[in-house]
Image (cartoon, rainbow, N blue to C red):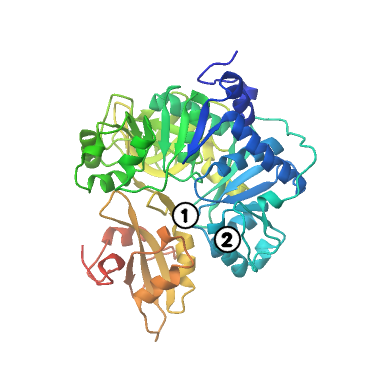
Amino acid sequence: MASFPLSPDASGRHIIILLRQRIALAPRARLLSFGERNLSAEDLLAAGQVFAKAFGGAGLQAGERVAIQCANRPEFIAALIGCALAGLVLVPINTASRGAQLAYYVKNSKARVFVAESSQLPHLESAYLTDPDAMAGLAVWSLDPGCTSAALPGLLNIKDVPVADHLQPAEPASAAPAMVIYTSGTSGPSKGVVCSHAQLYWWGHYSLQNIGIRDTDVLYTCLPLFHINALNTFFQALLSGGCMVIGPKFSVSRFFADIARAKATVTYLLGAMLPMLMSREAAADEREHQVRVALAPGATAQHYEAFQHRTGIEVLDGFGSTEANFVICTPLGEPRPGWMGRVTAGFHARVVDTDDNEVPHGTTGELILRNDDPFAFASGYFEMPEKTAEAWRNLWLHTGDRVLRDEHGYFKFIDRIKDCIRRRGENISSYEVEQVVMAHTAVAEVAAYAAPSELAEDEVMCALVLRDGVSFDPLELIKWCEPRLPYFAVPRFLRTLGALPRTESGKVQKYKLRAEGRTADTWDLASGGHVVKR
């Protein structure tokens, strides 16, 4: 007889089997809350069956992909369950994606169906206008009634989709792909990370251990479900016997009231959120809650300690990625601000040089990882075998992150080796920013890279070489970018140069641009467009 936390055998690491075990133990216990809606495992399985029958009615075959673009709502989880029942693969898409980026996700994933809420339909329309060939033949289903669009052929409300008379459930397989989650590329387009059902199970399993989650816990998140962090929160609730509460979008003024209203005992933040919360005036509501621990990867030492002192909430740092798992974490009760923590049992980590030789303690190098449990890491990049082989060379996952490890086994993040920008909790592909900026008629060359912000995160900075004889208005370039990029990827800083620094082979030396930082000639959008020196 199963018990909490759920620990199935190798054949049971699949969301459908886990839901059925949860139903057998606590059929009506609350598993997911959203606003006034409280859903049990039984409710979610039934909602998933509705999606599965619609997928069957559309003629989808096992292994095919279904894209979804929506804000946090129970239908996201129901669509995941529906895909699992039908043997399909869900492709979550960032709600800020639009235009060419969105069309690329559809084309690359070969999605047959696109499920969207009404607020996302304009983004989808922009993708059709940008690349109609990539969107050809795509069935579009709206989660909300009353939606119409002349630009989206065949748009249907999901309640109007013809359904299969009989659902033939797929055989649950732990190694089968559950999702393809796109993560930003560094020297090319974004890559789709293939996450198996077993990997999602192991995310939940190790999170329970690292965070100390119990069956009485209420897990509150306002982070987006299309990222692994919030999605993992659902699996933590499913396995532990606890409940996940999906909150509204993060708000500094409302956060503490939200966790109190939810009766949360565990919550999830990004490191950049701590200085935002600490920037407000201290108030009584910072302690009028039941939260005992917050997972906040990337928290700086300064804000880590201030947050714990003011709120009474223990902060855990850590390291995980879509390709990997919850590999490194601060041990409970052993805070060490500014350090990610130690390796979780079941994983292995090394710090290596460019030839994968391990470096001494206290020396920086690239973090590489291995897993003991089958399928605890991603299965590779969707239809990108060369990129998969490159990332997993020598049978170790290469993270592209520069870290150091001390003699006690603690790991400290230094910076990113890969050319990726982390802003507002989002990974931004410099390549995708560059493609948009280069399309502007005034720009001859561009390099996009990270510049430090006043918060514990990056800002997007672009160094530009202008075309001869053209006039240039920085604010006009920003306005050019806004409808073509997610809001968080729009550059804040601009510099114009006579030439970009390059190697003898012609590669742009972005490390030199990063080292120069915000120079006297840097244009800053946040300062009202003035040229400022920091």
> In the figure, is residue 91 to the left or right of 136?
left
Residue at screen point 61% across, 69% down: 129
Q: What residue type is labelled 1?
A: Thr
| Residue 109 image position (x, y, % from top left) | 63, 52
How many numbered tags mark residues here? 2
Residue 121, which numbered label? 2
Q: Which amino acid does label 2 sit on?
A: Leu
**Residue farthest along the bottom direction in this orientation:** 469
Residue at screen point 27% across, 61% down: 517
Q: Label 2: how many residues lie within 10 Å, few (<14), some (14-19) or many (20+)?
A: many
Mark 1, residue position? 186
Q: Label 1: how many residues lie within 10 Å, few (<14), some (14-19) or many (20+)?
A: many
- Quarter-of-image position of residue 301: top left
- Sequence order check: which comes first, mark 1 or mark 2? 2
**Residue farthest along the front direction in this orientation:** 36
Q: Can residue 359 be seen in this view?
A: no
> In the figure, is residue 222 to the left or right of 191?
left
Towards the viewer: 384 or 163: 163
| Residue 497 image position (x, y, % from top left) | 33, 73
Q: Secondary structure under badge 1? A: loop
Classify the position of the N terminus by image quarter.
Answer: top right
Towards the viewer: 388 or 324: 324
Residue 401, which numbered label? none
Q: Secondary structure under badge 2? A: helix
- Quarter-of-image position of residue 316: top left
For the residues marked 1 and 2, what is the alpha-carbon distance in whole angstroms?
A: 28 Å
Q: Nearer the viewer, mark 1 or mark 2?
A: 2
| Residue 202 image position (x, y, % from top left) | 52, 29
**Residue farthest along the top direction in this orientation:** 1
Q: Is residue 246 visible?
A: yes
| Residue 248 image position (x, y, % from top left) | 42, 46
Towards the viewer: 70 or 190: 70
